[in-house]
Amino acid sequence: MSEQTPIVVVKNLVKHFSVTRGIVFQHKIGAVRAVDGISLTIGEGETLGLVGESGCGKTTAGRTLLGLYVATSGEVMIDGHNVRKARGDELLLIRRTAQIIFQDPYASLNPRWTVNAIVSEPMRVHHLLSGSERTERVAELMHLVGLSGRLVNRFPHEFSGGQRQRIGIARALASNPKFIVCDEPISALDVSIQAQVVNLLEDLQDQFRLTYLFIAHDLSMVRHICDRVAVMYLGIIVELGERNELYEHPLHPYTTALLSAVPIPDPMKDRLRKRIILPGDVPSPIDPPSGCRFHPRCPIADENCSRVVPEWRLAAPSHWVACHKV
């Protein structure tokens, strides 16, 4: 658990998407268990990384946590407010406190709106500032994210991908939030631009004491920006620990396999390292395996792993894992 005061507390969060059959009379035949009972806390001013393969439920977890998807069950507290139970003014307050930076800067900005309209929208919704003050605030936010305030009357198609993502960051900051979900904010950008966006996020965090949930594929970038890292597999978190502890002493076999794929700058060390190739594909979230969900692909699994769900436990100081073999 985090040593800081938790601004986000998630307990047994579940999000299932119904699978139906029929055109006129639809009936439920199953459910995609995208998020299947995750628990975590994020301290004030902390960055928690959430990593895992595509389709493991990272984005769904982030959106359900904010209430963009209605949770099937579980509890989410953001700055002392219960997201699932909030209504009216309290829900509006949560929306102001918690924001999101979307993955695709090309799809997340309204192409018919100017930058001024896009960035000022949160201020209008939350009744922050008057018309002229909003325009000044938009120019200030543009400068804050490294863009000229003179560009506020342009449309999204006039900007590059990196510039659009900066506009998305400016929009997220417009309501003065405390917590931001960064949903793979650099994966759609060129490598040359990724470092600039990550450095911008770090600078803004220091300046405004922001708290981040940083969802990503790039494990080397996660190590650079995050304080703690949670590893997700097939809808559940299998390991959670301090950044350096988890990278240097991974406990779960899935985490070990993920880290074996991270490039090492030293060619000699890279040649000596053993790459772990996991057999098979990720099982379907409609029908996940019994027992430990990783056991069909795990190199050290035994019969017990296929029958018994591993306990989520503290294996070392601030290092949690769900594995029978640890």
Image (cartoon, helix red, strand yellow):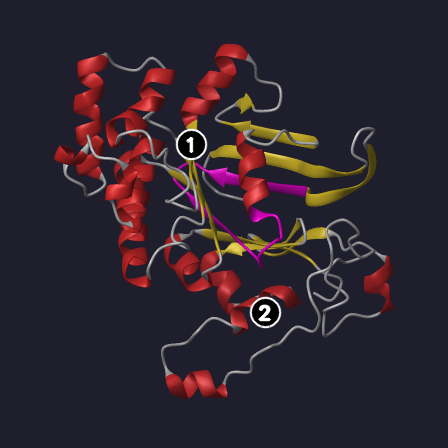
Of residues 122 and 99, which is closer to you in this image? Answer: 122
| Residue drawn at (35%, 33%) of the image | 172
2 vs 1, front mark: 1
Q: Position of residue 12 (x, y in %)?
A: 68, 37
Circle nearer the N terminus (2, 1):
1
Q: Secondary structure at mark 1?
A: strand
| Residue drawn at (63%, 65%) of the image | 254
Q: Position of residue 108 (x, y in %)?
A: 41, 38
Q: How many other residues sit within 10 Å of disc 1, few (<14), some (14-19) or many (≥20)?
A: many
Q: Circle 1 is placed at which residue position?
A: 99
Q: How many other residues sit within 10 Å of disc 2, few (<14), some (14-19) or many (≥20)?
A: some
Image-based side of 274 in relation to 160, left or right: right
| Residue 315 to residue 257: above or below | above
| Residue drawn at (32%, 56%) of the image | 194
Residue 234 in magenta stretch: no
The magenta span reads: 37-58
Residue type at mark 2? Answer: Thr
Image quadrant in which you'd find residue 87: top right
Of residues 44 and 64, which is closer to you in this image? Answer: 64
Q: Secondary structure at mark 2?
A: helix
Of residues 139 and 326, which is closer to you in this image? Answer: 139
Residue type at mark 1? Answer: Gln
Q: CA distance from mark 2 to mark 1?
A: 32 Å
Image-based side of 117 in relation to 52, left or right: left
Q: Which quadrant holds the C terminus?
A: bottom right
Image quadrant in which you'd find residue 252: bottom right
Image quadrant in which you'd find residue 307: bottom right
Residue 264 bears which disc, if any?
A: none
Residue 256 bears which disc, if any?
A: 2
Q: Position of residue 287 (x, y in %)?
A: 80, 51
Residue 52 in magenta stretch: yes
